[in-house]
Image (cartoon, rainbow, N blue to C red):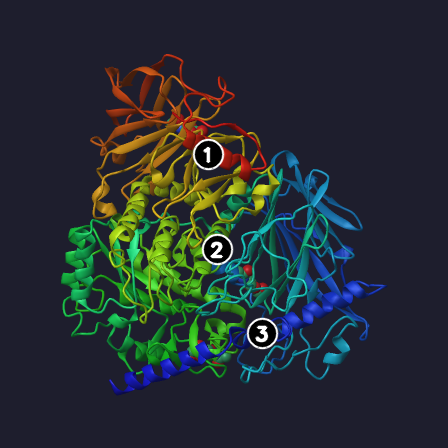
Amino acid sequence: MKTSFSGIILVLLIQLGFVLSYKEYLFKTCSSSGFCHRNREFARNVQRATNFVPQYAIDPKSVEVDPELYVIKGQVLKHLAQLGKSVQLPFELTLLDKNNVRFQIFEDRSTAQPKNALVNTARYNETTKWSFKTDQVTIERVKDEKVIKDENHVSFQFGKDGKYRAELSYSPVRLVIYAGDEAQLVMNDNNFLNYEHFRTENENSKHLSPYESDFDMFSESFKETRHDKIPMGPESISSDFTFKGFKHVYGIPEHADSFNLKDTTGSDLPYRLFNVDIFEYVPNSRMPMYGSIPFLLASKPGVSVGLFWINSADTFIDINKKHEKDTSTHWMSENGVLDVVLTVGERPEDINESYGSLTGYVQLPPLFSLGYHQCRWNYNDEKDVLNINSLFDEHQIPYDVIWLDVDYADSRKYFTWQPEKFPDPEGMLKELDITGRNLVLIIDTHLKTGYSLSDTIREKEITIKDSENKTFVGQCWPGEAVWLDSMNPASQEFWDEQHALSDENTFMGRFSTNFYIWNDMNEPSIFDGIETTSLKSNLHYGNWEHRSVHNVFGLTFHEATYKALVKRLESTERQRPFILTRSFYAGSQRTAAMWTGDNMSKWEYLKASIPMVLTLGVSGMPFAGADVGGFFGDPSKELLTRWYQTGIWYPFFRAHAHIDSRRREPWVPGGSYTSIIRDAIRLRYALLPMWYTSFFESSQTGVPVLKPTFYDNLNNIESYDIEDQFYLGNSGILVKPVTDEGASSTEIYLPDEQIYYDFTGGCISNRSYQLTEPGFITKDVLLADIPMLLKGGSIVAAKNRYRRSSHLMANDPYTLTVALDKDGDASGRLYVDDGSSFNYERGEYLYLNFTANKTSIASTAENNSAFAESLGNIKVEKLQLLGRRDITEAKAECDGETWNLSFKTEGANTIVTNPKLPVNKNWTVHLQSDGSSQSAEEEDKPKGALSSGLLVSVGAILASSAAALKYFSIL
Ligand SMILES: *[C@@H]1O[C@H](CO)[C@@H](O)[C@H](O)[C@H]1NC(C)=O
Ligand SMILES: *[C@@H]1O[C@H](CO)[C@@H](O)[C@H](O)[C@H]1NC(C)=O
Ligand SMILES: *[C@@H]1O[C@H](CO)[C@@H](O)[C@H](O)[C@H]1NC(C)=O
């Protein structure tokens, strides 16, 4: 206890120090980072040069097409004018599956003499080993006849009907991706290509070009940096990429910034990718955060492109939007090989699909993990946990998971329990399991020194090492700690043992299946480290410097946990694990969800969470969310309520709070606040079928789970900047969370001329909106209101009965809501499986199509599996037909039987009550109508008795919208 007490004091002191110091003091900016400083200066000098002489050129004689692999290979020559010689940098150009054009430039450093003889002298080229879904990416065969080679270029066509083309010019080195005849994406357009080859400090001056700076090439001057010897000297890589005709670029998370990325020219802080523990991060900032995905999406009408900069070292990205038409970007990494994938397609979804074909699509999460998660630092003991559990039932609020933060563990030694507080963890898990609930436990990558597990990893030599190849020791939650090197293959075996199911009295050995893992602090966070993380000179397996692998390290850790959890059960019984990670990299989506870390209980953080989650979604990492309520501080009742109403739209929906925050479970604010929060959480549960369907679709094609407004409206440039509203997948549900204090109204952007049915809080109403051109409508909002619209053309499936957890909803009936579009059609999809196993991979699922027009509604199943058979008793209990008052007869037809349906009108809509349509069979509902229904074809102007209230609304809408209101229907 003594050591842990002093450990806590130290941690507190360090934390206090952090709070007192200003963030930007703690973290490098471009000018204080050697490689960023140098590359920006290089770019500036190149731009200023009146007679720029390119230093890099491809040797035309070296270019050849490998007949086996259809890889185009050759040498880039870097000319050193002072020495009158060239450095050879081999390159490869390959076409991968799904329009991915990959360009790599290597350097042979096998004879280099580093300052530290222990380091691997090669440039790190294994980022793809972790990031790609398999080692075997498919190389698309570029047909010989399609490769055109002359003295100045090599090029090839690709894509359907050869509609795209990649062309590599030799001098200057330039790679251009064309769609038709138009250049879309140009690498090295501005001649910022820079590849710092190996040289010794003594000879350095002779190796520099007149455009280069030698700032911090062999030593660090950043004030916080301690003894970084930079053993390989300067080794950065950089290039610019111009997006021709694109003014909107997205991605490169994680930053607390706008969705459409900002211009960074003139700022000392370009977008930085460097995984750090940046508690209380600042909104509207390009500062680094916990994870990195070096993927950028650019869209314009007709063409979208993607850029994946495959590098796991510290990286800065400058974005320049000053040009009238184009966006240019400048990518700079501290080391590694230059490895970039350029993708082209028609739509942003095509780019998501291409990117996911390399790094994998999001895992299909277990269904429970899409429910509500209740966390705080800390639920103190078993009694506390079970008390919270029963309070949810007392207040009739559904939830699926309760979480335990660091203080469940004895002296923060992971894989132990505080014995007095958790005397019977197995009993606690069983108690939770009765109502289908789960427990998530935190397990971090650091292990406290001086207990059996840290001793074991030291003995096995599977720790992160210092620059002298001795186990690195630093400060973290438990005080002094060592770090598991999850990049070492031998650490997997150790990790498997810790998570294995067994009869022995090991930590996890006897647990049933309702527990899951939270991997935190895996940037790695090190309290006494530089920039709160590992020294760059630390060593990993293979003698790779931490410098080279920093951004991918967190992924290697949560992936090791995933593999260990999968192995707990025999292959036929395997359950999909759920893991939450804080640090992430391109590829993390395959095995973990993420959250946006330590935010604050302030309105600006609530607002910032939406573009952050949208950005993660278009970057292949859709299973994301922010801490509901804000981690630090105490939210007002109003903020907490609005945060729940927003949080139910995060793909990962969890409330969390700091140890110093007051309790704030949903019942704490009390009165109407609690009932509004209850309604919000119940809405999340009602729509779980749509969430699960969206996740399934994302797991198959890479389409984001929260769909940005512009995805559906590519010809409407105005929609490209919308970042405060979104669709739930392809469901047609358009949401505009309220994120302003004291709001009494909100503006919703209607991106097209479609009908939008009012769906506030998921409830049908008598209103719908339609504009003659895109624009905003204004809606009054009460605290209880969650502004939602249902786009015409959609069919939504929901489960509306209150249950205590998602598990208990499995056999509940569905309500279908049918919203015809202006042409009188609608469609929707529903995906169902067992929610937990891997059997869906063998086709054990049901994937339905719903279609509707004015005279029928039909369901067709795509799959007839044993699973689908097992759903025999699950029925549709209600059909809500929006904007229909004209039905005179409704009949169901299924399996050769027909039966009459009863229905009633409710305001502007018709409700078919209990049609008993089986969910696992094909069926059709035939509708007869008297033709009196309002529809766009028949109607051009408001009709019916307009109340004075309506007229006020119409006026408000017209006043706030540039576009004219076409019609506005109400009973
Ligand atoms: C560093 O230590 C590891 C584990 O003992 C060993 O395998 C590796 O060869 C060492 N590296 C060097 C360069 O000596
Ligand atoms: C990295 O480079 C080495 C040496 O050229 C090569 O053997 C290895 O296959 C490369 N690894 C990857 C993942 O490309
Ligand atoms: C469902 O709709 C999709 C998309 O329109 C189509 O590809 C699929 O074949 C349909 N399946 C069935 C069973 O109708």
**Residue occupying image coordinates x 25% and y 34%:** 866
Residue 952, which numbered label? Answer: 1
Between the C-alphas of marks 2 and 1, the distance is 36 Å
Find disc 3 in the rendering and name its residue. Answer: 121
774 vs 493: above or below: above
Residue 503, which numbered label? Answer: none
Q: What's the residue type where badge 3 is placed?
A: Thr
Q: Earlier in the sequence, mark 2 or mark 1?
A: 2
548 vs 478: above or below: above
Q: What's the residue type where badge 1 is placed?
A: Val
Q: Is residue 489 left or right of residue 368?
A: right
Q: Earlier in the sequence, mark 1 or mark 3?
A: 3
Give the quadrant of residue 710: top right
Give the quadrant of residue 765: top left
Nearer the observer, 845 or 666: 666
Residue 793 pos. (x, y %): 44, 29
